[in-house]
Structures are given as C-alpha cells and as structure tokens.
Image (tube, rainbow, N blue to C red):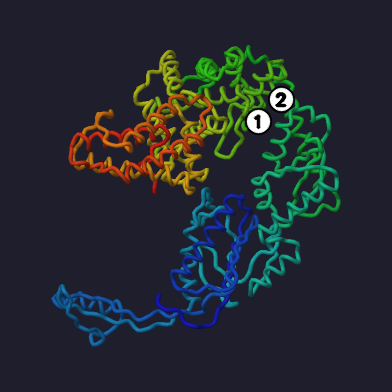
C-alpha cells in the first residue's frame, strides 16, 4: 500500500465469546490476536491513532483500536508484463489479470529487451473491506497449544467459540468464520446464554459490563484482587505471600471477583505445611494465610466469581478443603510410619528410565557418588550415604502419588518423623532443588551434595544412552538439570572437580552393566555444561564477548572460578582498570599474532635474557616474573579483583616498552626474542582470562 490519505479515523472493535478458556490459552490468544491485528494494520498502512486495548476474561477476548484510518490510498505503480517476443497468449493473460485493454499498456526497452508495462491507477480502498476480507484469515492463524473441535464443525479453537462481535465505524463487519456469522451482538451472561445484547461501540460495551460488576481489563482485575486480598488479610491480622503465578491464574478464571475468608479445622495444622499449602494453592487456587510469626493458620482466602450473600460459596469451599485435607491426613499418618530403610528394596519395582535401571540402581549410584563428593567438600560420609539411600523412597508413598510436586519434600518429612538426623532430613527434602533458573538454591552443604549427585547421575545416564537435547527440544529437561548443577556450584561458591565426578559416575554405571562410550560422554557433557554456563552468564547480564571469551579459557573443573572472573571483568570492563588490562593484552597479542602469521614463526616459549638490549626489555621481563609468581602463589580463596589489579600494574612497563623498543628489529634473533617476551606477557594474562576475543 502506498501513501496515507488524510482522512477520518474510525473505531475497530472485536469480541470473541467462547466457553471458559484455561488461563494460559486465554492469555496467549489475546496477546497473539492483538499483535497480529496491529501488524496487519501497519503492513497495509492503516494508520493507528488513539488508544488500543486487548482484554480477556474466562469467556471473552476483546480487542479495540479506537482510531484507525477509515480508508487508504493505494498508490499508482508500474507493473512489468511479458516481453515483446512472448507468445500472444502471455500478453492476453496479463491484460485479463488487470482487466485492461492493449491500448493501456506501454512498450519499453530494458537491458533484457522490450517489455510491456502497465501503470496501475491510484486507488482508494475502504478499511472496512480490507478487514472484512482478512479478519477470518487472521483468526485462523491463532495458534493454540491445545485446541478443541466440537460438533460437526471444522473449527479448532481453545474452547468452543459461540459468537463473534465485530464493529468498524459503528457498523457490524459482515463476514463468516467457519459456522459463525459475525454480528454486533454478544452473550452478556456467561451462565445464561439466552441473554444477549447489541453494541455499537466499545465505550458502551465497557460501560455495560462495568455496571454489572464485570472487570474486563485483566490488569485492573488483578490489581483489584490483590488489593482485596491484602485488605481482608490485614483486617483479620493475617499475612499473605501471594504467588505471582497463582494470582495471574486466579485473575484469568474470574470476571467479577469477590474475596471470601474461609477456614478449616485446626487439627489439620499437624500435617506438614507443605502439604497444606500445595493443596490450597495448586489444587484449589486458594491463598493460604500466616500469623505474624510466619506460622501457617487455618484461615484461607478464596476468590469467588460472584457475591456470597448467603455464605453458600464459603461453605462449599470449606467442605471441599475439608475433604481434601481428610485424605491428606490419612495418607500422612500411614506413610510417615512406614520404615524408609525397609522400603528400599521396593524401589527395584520402579523403573528410572529404559536403559538406566531402576530407582534402586539409581540410589546405589547416588550413594557412592555422594560419598566421593563428601571427600571434596569435607562433610560426613556416613550422613550423606544415609540420605542418598532413602532420598527416593517417598516415590512409593500415597502422598507423592497425590502430590507429585512434593517429591523429596515429603521424603524429608518422613525422615524427620522417623528420627533421622537433621542434615539427612534437610538434604532429602531439598535434593530436587533448584528446579529452574529462578527457583531456590539449597545452601546446606549436605543438600548441595545430594542434589549434585542426583543430577549428575541423571545427566551421565542420558548422555550415555545418547539422549542429548537437540535444537529447542529437551523432552527430559536435561538443560534444566544442567543449569541446576551450574547454579549449585556458582551460587554456593563451590570449587569441585566435575570431570573426576563424571568419570566416577561412568564407572558406577559400568559396574551395574551399563557400558557407555566414556570419551564421547565426557566430551559431550563437558560442552553441554559450558553451554549452560554461557546461558547462565548472559542471564546475569554479563557482556556477550566476555562470556564467549570465558568459555574458550574455561573448564568444567573451574566453573565457579571461571564465572567469578567473568563477573569481575564485566564489572570493570568500562572502567580504567578493565580498559587498560584489555588494551595491554590486545596491543601485545596483535603484534605477536600478526608476526607469527606473516612469518610462520614457531615460538619456543622461552626468553633469552642475554639478548636484551635495554632496561625496557629487562623491566618488562621482571614484571612478567612477578605476575607469574603471583598466580603460582594464589591460595584457595582467589581474589580475582586483586588479580585484575595486578595485571593493571603492567601498564607502565608495557607502555615504556612499546614507546622505546622496536619489536621488529633487523637482527632476527633479537626480533624473535622480543616476540617471545610478548608471548610470555600474553600467557601471563591467560592465567586470568582469555582476552583475545574481548572487544576493545
């Protein structure tokens, strides 16, 4: 489309009414539809002015563009047709496609010969016509993670679509979408679909629903719910910790929210609070409450989709939670008394993964792997072996079958109820953590050990049977496991030799009869872990060139040290300290690499001090020896900030060297010796970092 005409602006309004759509599907469709419409308008030079809105409720998606061009002008353009030498049929087809006569085309010469050309006239197009023609195509393109097909209709939608309200400039847009015909009518009561109403604009639509207490704007609805939750909890001296994801979900399952305070029998507070919270939040979408000492109370908040003047909604929800907690209490009392040690053999009946044995086999490997790590981290081998032995036993419990998200956590509660030591209970409870990039990272050293052992065993096993993630596909969440390993090490500042642990894990698999290609697994897993380190570093805001350079010089045995160096360099890269260090290296490396490439030199990595001709060479060599000694004497508690400062101290000697010494001396022995000196300088810097890829 060509230039925009200076014309009247008109409102476009679309509402899609369906059966209740799950929150994630609803949110995704709303966002996609709005962006697709906006993109279509922009691509077709339909000017957008004024406000735009995209709202959703469980049943509705409403899109509004308050002012868009009522009409547009399609500019004249010259269209190339067939050549003069082409068959007559080609020209006739060209004329027919534009509905023109031969007298309306011109013959012009080009580099490839003579061709017919047609200049299309400037054309005024009504936006209404464009929308009418293309809106069904835009709706068809909405992608659903899960969709339904119902009745004899051929439409696939998130949930059965009941009506389409489509208006432009106050006029209904007359089009069909599958079995539905668009109109200016919609259902105004989701529970009684015989109630319908006509609308001529978005303002009257919003006003009508507002008068009926329906909050169409999901953001305003979320804010209203949050305010009500806080108001009611404060009024009753209760405290809440609202999970943002839960609040989003609740927002998208109600349209006229009403917060109700409910309660359950205090006897259920004897059940571990994790079970109670999961029951309330995940299963029932309730908000648990706490007292000022952060203890869970027997009160909870429900967000209803209607008022409750007779208290029936309150009573109904209290009955529901009573039934759920009765079951939980029964299973808790039964499971906590079942001896964890005696149930170990039951794990032989649960397959871990095809080709990797049972969960009993896995716990035996984890036990030995944890023992090895305990030596490095200097913790009780006996305690960690006990924890590793029982960490998967809760998989046999009724409660885990009911609450699979509490795997490990319940095992920790069972262990505590049976008198196991505190470190054992906590490590069992936390060994699935962290479960993602943003989840909690355990700080207890026993939990860290058990979590590392469990995840490394899984990674080695899956890489051993060649189930390595490719592209965006990761069906077994191996990237998540690896990010967890990276986070456990970095965020707990642990120095651990991963390569030897992976080697030992491969040995343990072999002892159980699983024969893997050790060299391949080591190489693939090494690269995979470093890739996850790269992603983790980028997420932490570290500059891409620094991240890429760190991977070149990094090793999985130095994950924490490698990351810490990138963090320190990233923090200083724009300061004088970082700029100077990078500058020293790059100046030296540039001359060195250029000469090596140009003259195909082979350096011996040794300097002949007898060939020095001035103090500038001697002083630089002396400084290199000092920094070499510094890096050799670094203790376990590396001070990487200080290391960068030590490299900065080269600045004076290096500048004096380059200002007063000609590296490319006529004497080839002296020249090579000076290049050896620069090579030694670069290698000194390599002790800290590979600076070669850092942008100056």
Q: Residue at x 38, y 40 (%)?
A: 653
Residue 145, percent across and down? 51, 48
Residue 465 appears left or right of 344: left
Q: Residue at x 53, y 20 (%)?
A: 359
Reply above or below: 508 against 404.
above
Number of numbered discs overlaid on the protein picture = 2
Residue in the foreground of this view, choosing between 320 and 191: 320
Task: Please provide percent x and percent y for residue 462.
Answer: 43, 27
Q: Residue at x 37, y 44 (%)?
A: 655
Dot 2 alpha-carbon crowd within 10 angstroms: few under 14, some 14 to 19, many 20 or more: some
Relative horizontal placement of residue 685, taking residue 26 as reference (left or right): left
Name the residue beneath numbered marker 2: 331
Report which quarter residue 436 is drawn in.
top right
Q: For residue 694, which quarter of the picture? A: top left
Sequence order check, earlier mark of 2 and 1: 2
Q: Position of residue 218 (x, y in %)?
A: 66, 57
Residue 348 appears in view: no
> What is the CA distance from the residue labelled 2 to the residue labelled 1?
9 Å
Drawn side of residue 627 relative to residue 338, left or right = left
Secondary element under disc 2, as helix, strand or loop, is helix
Residue most extreme to the bottom: 103
Tell me whether the residue at label 2 lies in contact with that at label 1, contact meaning CB atoms closer than 8 angstroms.
yes
Query: Alpha-carbon neighbours of circle 1 within 10 Å: few (<14), some, or many (≥20)?
Result: some
Q: Quadrant of the N terminus?
A: bottom left
SS class, disc 1: helix
The quadrant in which residue 263 appears is top right
Q: Which residue is mark 1?
A: 402
Residue 251: image tag: none
Compared to residue 341, the image places residue 482 above or below, namely: below
Residue 390 image position (x, y, % from top left):
61, 17
Q: Residue at x 53, y 48 (%)?
A: 146
- Residues 114 and 576: in front is 576
């Amino acid at each position: 489309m060509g230039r925009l005409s200076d014309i009247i602006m008109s409102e476009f309004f679309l509402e899609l009414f369906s059966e209740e759509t799950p929150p994630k599907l609803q949110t995704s469709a709303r966002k996609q539809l709005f962006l697709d419409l906006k993109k279509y308008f922009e691509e077709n030079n339909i000017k957008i002015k004024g406000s735009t809105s995209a709202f959703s409720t469980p049943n509705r998606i409403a899109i509004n563009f308050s002012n868009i061009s009522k009409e547009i002008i399609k500019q004249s353009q010259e269209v190339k047709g067939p050549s003069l030498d082409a068959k007559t049929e080609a020209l006739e087809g060209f004329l027919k496609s534009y509905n023109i006569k031969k007298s309306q085309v011109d013959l012009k010469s080009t580099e490839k010969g003579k061709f017919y050309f047609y200049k299309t006239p400037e054309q005024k197009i009504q936006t209404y016509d464009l929308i009418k023609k293309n809106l069904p195509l835009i709706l068809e393109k909405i992608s659903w993670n899960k969709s339904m097909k119902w009745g004899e209709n051929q439409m696939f939608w998130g949930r059965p679509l009941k009506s389409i309200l489509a208006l432009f400039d106050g006029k209904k847009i007359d089009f069909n979408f599958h079995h539905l015909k668009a109109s200016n009518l919609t259902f105004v009561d989701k529970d009684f679909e015989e109630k319908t109403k006509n609308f001529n604009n978005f303002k009257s639509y919003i006003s009508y629903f507002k008068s009926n207490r329906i909050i169409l704007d999901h953001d305003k609805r979320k804010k209203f719910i949050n305010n009500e939750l806080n108001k009611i909890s404060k009024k009753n001296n209760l405290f809440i910790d609202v999970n943002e994801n839960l609040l989003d979900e609740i927002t998208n399952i109600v349209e006229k929210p009403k917060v109700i305070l409910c309660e359950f029998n205090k006897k259920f507070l004897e059940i571990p609070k994790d079970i109670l919270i999961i029951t309330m939040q995940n299963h029932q979408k309730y908000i648990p409450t706490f007292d000022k000492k952060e203890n869970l109370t027997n009160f909870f908040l429900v967000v209803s989709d209607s008022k409750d003047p007779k208290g029936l909604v309150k009573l109904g929800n209290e009955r529901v939670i009573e039934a759920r907690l009765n079951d939980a209490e029964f299973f808790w009392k039964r499971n906590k008394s079942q001896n964890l040690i005696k149930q170990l053999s039951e794990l032989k009946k649960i397959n871990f993964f095809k080709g990797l044995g049972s969960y009993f086999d896995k716990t035996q490997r984890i036990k030995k792997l944890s023992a090895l790590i305990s030596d490095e981290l200097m913790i009780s081998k006996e305690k960690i072996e006990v924890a590793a032995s029982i960490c998967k036993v809760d998989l046999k419990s009724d409660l885990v079958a009911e609450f699979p998200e509490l795997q490990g956590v319940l095992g920790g509660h069972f262990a505590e109820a049976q008198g196991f030591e505190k470190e054992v209970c906590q490590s069992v409870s936390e060994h699935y953590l962290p479960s993602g990039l943003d989840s909690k990272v355990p700080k207890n050293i026993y939990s860290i050990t058990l979590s590392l052992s469990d995840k490394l065993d899984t990674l080695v096993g899956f890489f051993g049977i060649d189930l390595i993630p490719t592209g965006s596909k990761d069906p077994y969440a191996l990237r998540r496991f690896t990010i967890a390993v990276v986070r456990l090490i970095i965020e707990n500042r642990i120095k651990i030799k991963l390569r030897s642990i992976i080697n030992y894990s491969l040995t343990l698999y072999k002892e159980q009869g699983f024969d893997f290609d050790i060299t391949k697994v080591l190489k693939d897993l090494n690269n995979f872990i470093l890739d996850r380190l790269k992603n983790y570093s980028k997420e932490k805001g570290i500059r891409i060139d620094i991240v890429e350079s760190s991977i070149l010089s990094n090793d999985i045995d130095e994950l924490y040290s490698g990351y810490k160096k990138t963090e320190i360099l990233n923090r200083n890269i724009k300061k004088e300290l970082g700029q100077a260090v990078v500058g020293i290296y790059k100046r030296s490396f540039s001359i060195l690499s250029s000469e090596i490439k140009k003259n195909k030199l082979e350096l011996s990595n040794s300097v002949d001090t007898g060939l020095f001709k001035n103090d500038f060479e001697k002083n630089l060599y002396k400084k290199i020896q000092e920094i070499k000694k510094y890096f050799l004497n670094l203790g376990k508690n590396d001070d990487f900030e200080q290391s960068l400062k030590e490299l900065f101290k080269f600045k004076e000697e290096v500048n004096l060297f380059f200002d007063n010494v000609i590296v490319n001396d006529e004497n080839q022995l002296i020249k090579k010796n000076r290049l050896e000196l620069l090579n030694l300088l670069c290698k000194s810097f390599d002790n800290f970092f590979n600076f070669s890829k850092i942008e100056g």
